Image (cartoon, coloured by chain):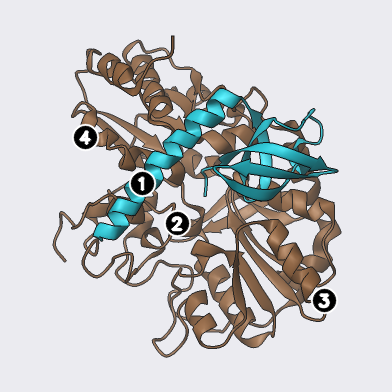
Amino acid sequence: MCLGIPMQIVAIEGYNARCTAKGVMREVSLFMLQDESVAVNDYVIVHVGYAIQKMTEQEAHSTWELLDELLAAENLDSEAA
Amino acid sequence: MTLTAQDWLKKIKALPLTRRVRIMNVCGGHERSITMAGLRAALPQNVELIPGPGCPVCVCPEEDVYLAIQLALHAGVILVAFGDMLRVPVNVPKSEPRSLEQAKAAGADIRPVASPQEAVRIARENPQRPVVFFAAGFETTTAPVAAMLLEGIPDNLFLLLSCRLTWPAVAMLLESETPGFDALVAPGHVATVMGPEEWSFVVEQHHMPAAVAGFSPVSLLAATYSVLRQRLEDECFLDNCYPEVVRSGGNATAQKQLKQALDVADANWRGIGIIPSSGFALNAQFAAHDARKKFTGYETEGRKRVGEMPPGCDCARVVLGKIYPNECKLFGTACTPRTPVGPCMVSDEGACRIWRASGVETSTTSA
């Protein structure tokens, strides 16, 4: 749960954004970033449905790769368990 | 040129370490990354990585979980909570529901949510029924709860708030006779919200090396290298190994929202006791949404083991970094992810569950 997920902003309406990560679309609140300039195509770290900080595209992509590896490892372990 | 995990490991192994160094992390996410990447096995033998109080579900007061169960069973509310709260056991006689999950099986309306916004949605969809959002978490989760409150919540949504700050438990350990660690890796997303400066006290008051880390093996190894080097050179400073997201000052807007919506208060930590100024309470403007004020009379007198970990459970020592998960007598035998005894085996952020998930099967001590 500490693990915020990087997501890319696809659309913004007021404080709410549609964001995407790894093929999944989510509604995300930008309420905590209201004093930052946030735009479509920006990347943000999302925790429990809220964007907590902006991040770079490079960092988002490397975190996505890392999450893929973590998920793969966890799936293997839960199958083995 | 960015260094790879292998590069960092080489640098660490090249350090002239003569004595054991114990490095504590206080984030379930860090522990998961460390364990899943097998970092402990890759590091030199005398570098120990210790999981500390980084699991908010594990330290959530037993009384709060019990209250949530009672409200769900007897107060006619819809009880919503983050998913891994549902399996946390409380100390009740065998005949009573021992967790929110068991209460749900007994007919209570209990629903897992992944976001404060889901709690709001459920309340809006059920305007005739009270909805209680049992919200447990550290600052990274508390800030979104504050945001939810300031955005405006419906009259029928109540908060059973059980949120904590991460650093006070570390401060308590450092002020005790035997803290049990020599360096600190500070939590990356807590620092993203609250700013890395929250951890300056580790360096300034306790002259202990510290580094904020992200969740990749690269970031964690960079932080490990940093604190080891700081120690060797006897020059402590608060390093930031997650600069892409952790900025000086953190997220000022989020901090302002926290202050507006919530007050810092003394808080109970399961198995540990009260730590002053370590938790959050609803600000007076939200008193009408406080489940603790709205629903009273659900505690029973004479309940045994109130506030403690379950009988025989050693979670408190795991949480404080006094023992490793597999040093608990029950690890892997009586206590497994399918049959958890204590919260450390229930929560995704719990060190015991993480170690089991990575393939550590049994305890090193016999029951």
- Mark toward the start of the polypeptide (3 vs 4): 4
Could you say which chain is coloured brown in the image? B
The span from disc 3 to disc 2 (Cα, nearest Å) is 39 Å
- Rendered position, B234 above or below B37: above
Q: Which mark is residue B349?
A: none
Could you tell me which secondary element the residue under label 1 belongs to? helix
Question: Nearer the viewer's eye, disc 2 or disc 1?
Answer: 1
Same chain check for tags 2 and 4 = yes
What residue does disc 2 label? Answer: B272
Give the quadrant of the C terminus of chain B. Answer: bottom left
What residue does disc 3 label? Answer: B127
Which residue is pictured at 61% across the width and 33% down the height? Answer: B192
Crowdedness of circle 3 by 10 Å Cα count: few (<14), some, many (20+)?
A: few
The amino acid marked with disc number 4 is Ala
- Mark toward the start of the polypeptide (3 vs 2): 3
Same chain check for tags 3 and 4 = yes
Q: Which mark is residue B41?
A: 4
Which colour denotes chain A?
Answer: cyan
